[in-house]
Amino acid sequence: MQQTDHDIDALAQALYNLSALRRDLQRFAGIEHAVGGLMVLAVVHRIGPVRISDVASDMQVNLSVASRQIQALEDDGYVDRVPDPNDGRSSLIAISAAGLTKLERAHQRLVGAIATAVDDWERSEITGLADGIVRLRAALGTCVDHHLPADRPAADPTLTSAAAADARHEEHLR
């Protein structure tokens, strides 16, 4: 199927709204922290106990951004620092019992809000949107960085989590 420039422009315009959508999801989930708070908790839960640098890599954010978000979560008791068994001089970040409860409740509220929002959608529209988001993320992760301005470095391909997101989406569909 051949898409038009208008189709691609409309998609780009829709994608500009993702930041607002992410903030809406955060609000519905009841996470009071920076916009990434829920995502940080989810990453720590999924791959933790983990180094802050691994959280930053998974989320494709700067180390200082991940560090600030983790500090806010730690201050509220949602994550704990635990000794690194491989390096006695450093610590890892693990989700606390309160963090796990917060994450589970946030996910339930989010699912409820999304269910209400798409109540009049066909199942194929919902699965099509989910599939499309995963597919676009994976495709963008494989794009050659020749579209970047010359003064902007190319993304580190080791930081992409598109394959992991795709695998989680496929597992969810089963």
Image (tube, rainbow, N blue to C red):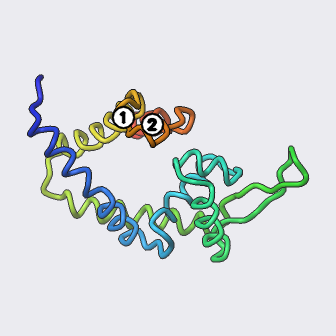
x and y percentages locating residue 77 in the rendered image: 66, 74
The answer to whether 79 appears left or right of 112 in the picture is right
Q: Amino acid at mark 2?
A: Ala
The residue lying toward the viewer, choosing from 29 and 8, is: 8
Q: Residue furthest top?
A: 1
Q: Are marks 1 and 2 in contact (CB under 8 Å)?
A: yes
The answer to whether 127 appears left or right of 63 in the picture is left
Residue at 62% in and 60% down: 64
Corner quadrant of residue 58: top right
Mark 2 residue element: helix
Mark 1 residue element: helix
Which disc, if any, is residue 140?
1
Residue at 18% in and 58% down: 119
Q: Residues within 10 Å of mark 1 (few under 14, many from 20)?
A: few
In this view, 50 is above or below 66: above
Q: Nearer the viewer, mark 1 or mark 2?
A: 1
Q: Earlier in the sequence, mark 1 or mark 2?
A: 1
Residue at 21% in and 62% down: 117
In this view, 27 is above or below 173: below
Residue at 30% in and 56% down: 18
CA–CA distance between discs 1 and 2? 9 Å
Quadrant showing the N terminus? top left
Q: Which residue is mark 2?
A: 162
The residue lying toward the viewer, choosing from 139 and 131, is: 139
Corner quadrant of residue 90: bottom right
x and y percentages locating residue 89 in the rendered image: 89, 54
Q: Amino acid at mark 1?
A: Leu
Which disc, if any, is residue 11?
none
The residue lying toward the viewer, choosing from 56 and 162, is: 56
